[in-house]
Amino acid sequence: FLGWHLAAYRRFAARVRQDCEPLCDHEAFPVQASPLVRSPLAFGVRGKMVVVPADFADRYDAAEQRIALAHEVTHHRRGDLIANFAGLAVLALHWFNPVAHIAWRAFRLDQEAACDAMVLRGASSEDRHVYGLALVKSATGGVPLAACTMTAKTGLKTRLRRIVEGRLAPMRGGAAVAGLLV
């Protein structure tokens, strides 16, 4: 299980690194565009960067671009990719247990909620609206489990509800379930 997911991530990483084009730097992290991704994502444990879709400049307006990049940089600053690999190792130990897969999804949703809260701390309702638009445009699937995408389709509704309600802090359910599982 772990080998399969690590191999999938390595193949994905190699293809993205081969096909990406440098765009700019955002808060000391290089931003690269790739036709292989459908939403912005934090990428790399070593050689950290943010990878955006090739049509990022066309699909996202300037405010959405700024907030999406801030979200991905927050993943890097928090060390979420390292946490994902550690969580994936725990999930591999319990691959047969459905509770472990539920805990993994809760853990990832809490990671995203924590980034949402950090990016939107003190944000106006207009900024929250822009953030919600960027989330909807970023809803995607098909990336390796260890990757930090701006959003996966499964947690989108929950995250949008939290943003609209102004309840941005993570629920800590994922950490509690993962801790209980370990």
Image (cartoon, rainbow, N blue to C red):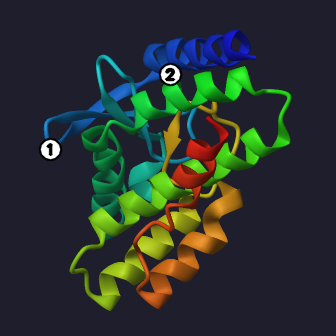
For the point 39% across and 24% down, the residue is: 44
For the point 54% across and 33% down, the residue is: 35
- Is label 1 or label 2 in front? 1
Considering depth in this image, is 127 or 120 the residue closer to the camera? 120
Considering depth in this image, is 112 or 131 the residue closer to the camera? 112
For the point 61% across and 14% down, the residue is: 6
Considering depth in this image, is 26 or 85 the residue closer to the camera? 85
Q: Secondary structure at mark 2?
A: helix
C-alpha distance separating marks 1 and 2: 21 Å
Q: Residue type at mark 2?
A: Val
Q: Quadrant of residue 92?
A: top right
Q: Secondary structure at mark 1?
A: loop
Q: Where 125 falls versus 178 (above or below)?
A: below
Q: Is residue 168 visible?
A: yes
Q: Quadrant of the C terminus?
A: top right
Q: Quadrant of residue 20?
A: top left
Mark 1 surroundings: few (<14), some (14-19) or many (≥20) residues within 10 A: few
For the point 76% across and 17% down, the residue is: 1
Mark 2 surroundings: few (<14), some (14-19) or many (≥20) residues within 10 A: some
Residue 27 - label: 1
Residue highlighted by disc 2: 16
Q: Residue type at mark 1?
A: Glu
**Drawn side of residue 169 relative to residue 136, left or right:** left
Q: Where 182 falls versus 117 (above or below)?
A: above
x then y, percent, for residue 89: 60, 22
Q: Is residue 62 visible?
A: no
x then y, percent, for residue 120: 30, 72
Mark earlier in primary sequence (1, 2): 2
x then y, percent, for residue 80: 40, 39
Residue, far left = 28
Residue 123 - label: none
